[in-house]
Amino acid sequence: MSLLFAGVELGGTKIVCALAKADGELLERIQIDTEAPEDSLPRIKAELQNLIDIHGPFAALGIGTFGPLQLNRSASDYGRLGPTPKLLWRDCDLYRYFADWLTVPVALDTDVNAAALGEVKWGAAVACDSVVYITVGTGIGGGVVVNGQPIHGLLHPELGHMRAPRAAGDDFEGNCPVHTDCIEGMAAGPAIVARWGKQLDQLPTNHVAYAQTAHYIAHLVTNSILLLSPGKVILGGGVMSNKNLFPMIRKNVQALLNGFIAVDAIEKSIDQYIVPPGLGGNSGVLGAIVLAMTTRD
Amino acid sequence: MSLLFAGVELGGTKIVCALAKADGELLERIQIDTEAPEDSLPRIKAELQNLIDIHGPFAALGIGTFGPLQLNRSASDYGRLGPTPKLLWRDCDLYRYFADWLTVPVALDTDVNAAALGEVKWGAAVACDSVVYITVGTGIGGGVVVNGQPIHGLLHPELGHMRAPRAAGDDFEGNCPVHTDCIEGMAAGPAIVARWGKQLDQLPTNHVAYAQTAHYIAHLVTNSILLLSPGKVILGGGVMSNKNLFPMIRKNVQALLNGFIAVDAIEKSIDQYIVPPGLGGNSGVLGAIVLAMTTRD
């Protein structure tokens, strides 16, 4: 009998609980709405208990969650949420909640680091030394995996909050509550709606909103390439589910780099370099499974 | 008798050859001017042979060089220089030249990755999981070390060529030959001279050139923090030897992040977070020694 691993993806609007084998085969996948922690945490526990009742014990639990999140293992508040804009979840001690309940190891990381990890293991970035995973949705976040390990450092990547030069003629003030006109404040879903009164999908593809959104995301991708030289850049999230953006972003990235990074991946086969998630909507929860599989707890 | 390691730092204007023990103690350090490769390469070889004659054989050679440079070990052109603006050195096969001569391992990386490695091993970033080393001089380059390993990926970091929003009132067109107004084109030494007719050191510290230079470098540092969350950011190079820039850059970085990365290193002790090289002018050559010590050839 092969080992089983449990994964939880904790997002701002939904939570996914899953059980998988070590080859990534999902045996169970349950999706529930995100409520306050006093409702959602017992609900997750009940779902996991149910999985145990059906399939027997799992070997470890991995959790990918929105942040900010303390990831320093030697810190007393390891696995606790920081000053998240989801106010009800501030200071929620995720690690403690599950580690006190379970006897098996509990591993945590950000949802986007988990997604990057899932994509390296089973998705669009298999065999890549390094990958940047960017999600453009309600916010803009990113995860980075280098040599198989998610990046932590001081905290963890928060790449959506870089600034970029403005798109030509763009006078929108930006709507990031912290940085006003950072890339998240100019190109995330709510910024598009605040500016144009509609989502991108509801606008014609020749609307300037497309060009402007592609402009900001292309700067983010270009900065990621110049700093990290990743083997693959993966763009996911609600806004990126509009596939018209991909060709525009790729073209902008090539124009911004202007031949400077003279490698085939950018010059000749950028269609295979800047790509959607290979695991579709399961990057995060499968990444949580990888966290469970690789924990050294 | 302890093992000895040789290191070469190949820069656009100078070359440093050195011999060190495994604890980083420099036994010899020779600095020569950079000429054409047909002059400089035999000169480096003669200096290394001289070190062998005096101290006996070294265990490995590490080379940190300007780029771009092929760092993919499985590529047929591993260790060859790419389309560098130093035209005489284009396509120079550094690895082959030294590997054909020596019987010991030869390890290569960019000068800035080497500098980052040196700083992690013996300098300002000891015990840091990750570090970004940025040099602001004739150009703006950067090296990144994560979990003890320099970043390669597709190529290697070229972070000076990111774009940033313009400083208020700044209408300089920029002088990067490839990207015009990227950060290198706005804030490297030649950009400052092209704009103001003088180097920063020759201008009063209340001159707007200081604020503008600090603005662009602060964006570069901020982007690095948001993408990589490094344990330390090290700023070296000729322009940064003007120590008046450090407090301005630190203040700008705090303003740009605006409390978003709520860690003490940024909020309370940024003086110990954004710092000059701990190894002074020897980061690069000592990093080359680390390359030699850690090669798996």
Image: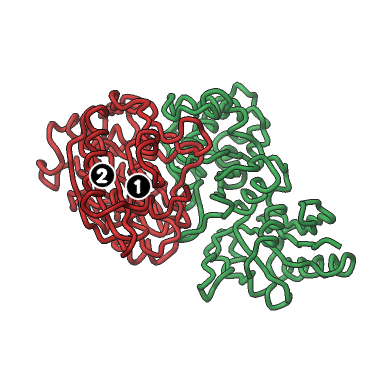
Chain colours: A green, B red
Q: Position of residue B102 (x, y in %)?
A: 36, 42
Q: Amino acid at mark 1?
A: Leu
Residue B270 visible in the displayed image: no
Q: Earlier in the sequence, mark 1 or mark 2?
A: 2
Q: Which residue is mark 1?
A: B61
Q: Which residue is mark 2?
A: B48
Tell me how far mark 1 sits from mark 2, CA to CA: 9 Å
Query: Callout 2 environment at 10 Å: few (<14), some (14 to 19), or many (20+)?
Result: many
Q: Is residue B138 left or right of residue A187?
A: left
- Closest to the observer: B63 or B144? B63
User: What residue occupies the far right of the structure in this picture?
Assistant: A54
Tag 1 and tag 2, C-beta contact below 8 Å: yes
Number of marks in the rendered image: 2
Q: Secondary structure at mark 1?
A: strand
Q: Position of residue A143 (x, y in %)?
A: 56, 50
Q: Is residue B19 left or right of residue A106?
A: left
Q: Is residue A90 above or below residue B30?
A: below
Q: Amino acid at mark 2?
A: Leu
Q: Is residue A250 left or right of residue B240?
A: right
